[in-house]
Each structure stands twice: as structure tokens, then as C-alpha cells.
Image (cartoon, rainbow, N blue to C red):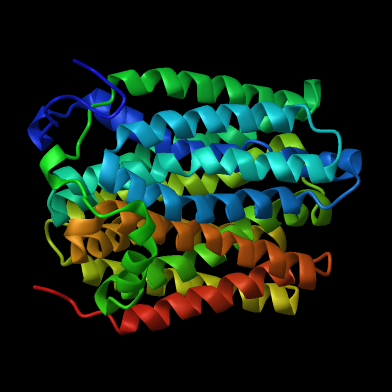
Amino acid sequence: MLNLQGRTQSVTAKQTGLTFVLILSALMAVTSLSTDIYLPSMPVMAKDLHGDAELTITGFLLGFCIAQLIWGPISDRVGRRLPLFIGMGLFVTGSVGCALSTDIVQIVFWRVFQALGACTGPMVARAMIRDLFSRTRATQMFSTLIIIMAIAPIAGPLIGGQMIKVTSWHAIFWLLAIIGSLMLMSLFWLPETLDVNKRSQAPISSAFSHYYALLTNVKYMRFTLCLTFYYVAAYAFITGSPAVYITYFGVDPQHYGWLFAVNIVGLMAVSMVNKRLVHRYPLEALLKVAVFIAALAAIVLAVTTGLGVGGIGVIVGAVFVFFSMNGIIAATSTACALDAVPNAAGSASALMGALQYGSGIISSLLLALFGDGTPWTMSWIIMAFTAASAVIALTIQVEK
């Protein structure tokens, strides 16, 4: 008998199939789509709402990272499915609120509300993978999810760019509400992965003591911080690229989506390669190589931008290399971090997600504080935090 907390008996890895993978990929994609789809409309939103449209990203990421810290322990205690049902309901409500907003304060509020639900998707998806699969197999599964979910950041800006041409930005959030409703219905086909006997018996109120234990777990935090610093850099591009491409270089909003999408194609290609590499090389070694390649690309980006040479072509090329490495960095660091704390997958996934996506707050605030109307601010932020990720990677020991 099917209920919101799960089936009477949880599934095993062998019992999962294509439907399971597709639903988890879609849940992870909701986060990207929630931001990427309206990137081309941000300049228009800023004029209509009489405020800084980048605050809508900041508000979303703030709600996203805080809410995960609550949902994580809840999912360890009651199972994975119930938080997803509640989360998708909140996401739909927040999307409708955004569509009806008339000023910057309203839409930032509803973006925070939207994030309270959206965060359950990637957080629970990661925990479900850890529930079922070993470290190497989990990395393969994360790579598969990344390949499928990458459709969202490719399609998002392209769809948003076309929609803003024929309608208003409000319609974009109505579309998100419809997508959220479809995701809510799909959850009835998603099985429970956390067996009743393996669920946490500790009260939810003790969650913060668990987070302290995670924060002081050196092995877990090395992988988590490596990913977090990389994502500060990644969000600097995601948040800053509309102003760089559309405002500074004069790229048409309809064409911006193609420049954004090329990076996701690189991510998908590297993720496909990573599925094979994990059988031949240690995960830690793959992570180190990927981070250092990203760091080299970030240095090229910052130097050429600072010197004012190369133009948009060098920016697109350097960002392509930098962003493509996410296909290895995200999968390997996530699998290694969760493997370090196998008995607290929900809380560990929540803390990792909170730091990973909350890192975007740092990016958007730095862009708002130091933005000078040129690509330089975005570039030095990407370089500085990718370098920090590389320094953390140096401290990671490779396991045979």
C-alpha cells in the first residue's frame, strides 16, 4: 500500500529503474530551472520592479540553504518521500506568488518561499542515491543524474529568452508553477529508499548537534568545502553573466541562452566521460585533476579580462572549460563526502547542499558590492574561489 511516508518495504538498488532515475534527475533540475529560466529577463525585471533583480537570486539561495538544514534531519527520521511532497507544494505556491508580484520586495519574499520547497529536490535525491548505492556506483549515478538534469539549464535560458520576447516575465513563473505541479504528481511513482529500521530515532531538535559533528568531521568537510568554493565561482558566472553578455557586450536576450547552454553541453560531455573514469581511477584523483583544470581556466579568464584582451570569445572559451569540470567535481565530491558519513545521509546531504547552493549568496553579494559594469568583477570572483577550491583539493588524500 502506497502512502506519503513510503511503502511498507523500502526498495533496493536492484529494484530501481529508469523511472526512478528520471524523477530524481527532474527533482535536481528544479533548482537550476528556478533560476536559469528567467536569467534572460533579469534586465527587464529590474526595470519593472524598480530594484536589483540579482536580489531574487540571493533570496532564493538564502531560503534554499537554510531550509535544507531543517529538511535533512526530517528526511532521516520520517523517510525521503514525505518531505518531497510538502516541498513541491511549497514550490508551486511560491511560483504563483512570484508571478503575481508587483515590486522587488514581494518577489524576493516569494522567491525565498519558493526555495523552501525547491531545496527538498536535490537534497533528497542525493540522500536516496546514498541510501542505495556504494561509493563508486553512487558517483556513476550522480554523473547520470547530472547528464539528464543538464537539460534544464540548457532549455531554461532558451525558453526564457523566447518567452520574454512574446510575453512578460510573469509568464515564466506561471510556467514554473505548472512544472512544479507536474513534479508533485510524479512523486506518486517514486519509491521510498530509507528502510524504517534505518531511520533516525533522535528528535528533530537534536539536529544542530548532528551538524556540529559533521562540521568537525575533517574528511567530510574537505570534500564539502572543495565543492562549496567551486560553486561560489560557478554562481558568480550564473548571476553575473546576464549583465556581462547582454548589457556589456550587447548580446540579444534570445541569444544569451545559447551562450549559457554551451557550458552545459560541456558539463554533460564530461559527466559521460566521468562514468567510465570512476572505474579506472580513484575518485579523489579525478576530483583533484578536475579542480586544477578549472582553476587554470579561471586564471586565464581573470588575466585576459583584467588586461582587456580577447573580448567575449575568450570569456566564452574559458568559462566553457571551467564549467565543464562541474561534471566531475560535483559527482566525485558528493559521493566521497556522503561516503564519509554513511549513517547520516540526509543531514550530510542537507549541510552539503546548504553550503553548496548558499555559496551563491556570496557571489551575488560580491557582484552587487563590487560590480563596475565590466566583466572584471565576475572574473576575479571566479578565479579567487576556484583557487580556494584547488587549495582544499591539495589536502585530500587519494584512497586506493
In the image, taking residue 205 as reference, residue 369 lies left or right, namely right
Q: Closest to the observer: 119 or 301?
A: 119
Q: From what the image shows, is residue 29 above or below residue 334?
A: above
The one nearer the camera, 240 or 85, is 85
The answer to whether residue 337 is above or below residue 142 is below
From the viewer's perspective, tell me whether residue 187 is left or right of residue 94.
left
Residue 1 found in image quarter: top left
Q: Nearer the viewer, residue 335 or 212?
A: 212
Where is residue 149 drawn, in percent x and y?
A: 41, 37
Which quarter shows the C terminus? bottom left
Image point (77%, 65%), residue name = 368
Counting labels gives: 0
Instruction: From the top left corner, tell me how far across and down residue 36 is, in percent.
Output: 61, 41
On the picture, is 95 further left or further right than 45?
left
Residue 26 position in % (x across, y down): 41, 32
The part of the image, by quadrant, that contains residue 178 is top right
Is residue 311 visible from the viewing direction of this image? yes
Give left or right: position of 373 versus 296.
Answer: right
Residue at 89%, 38% in the rendered image: 48
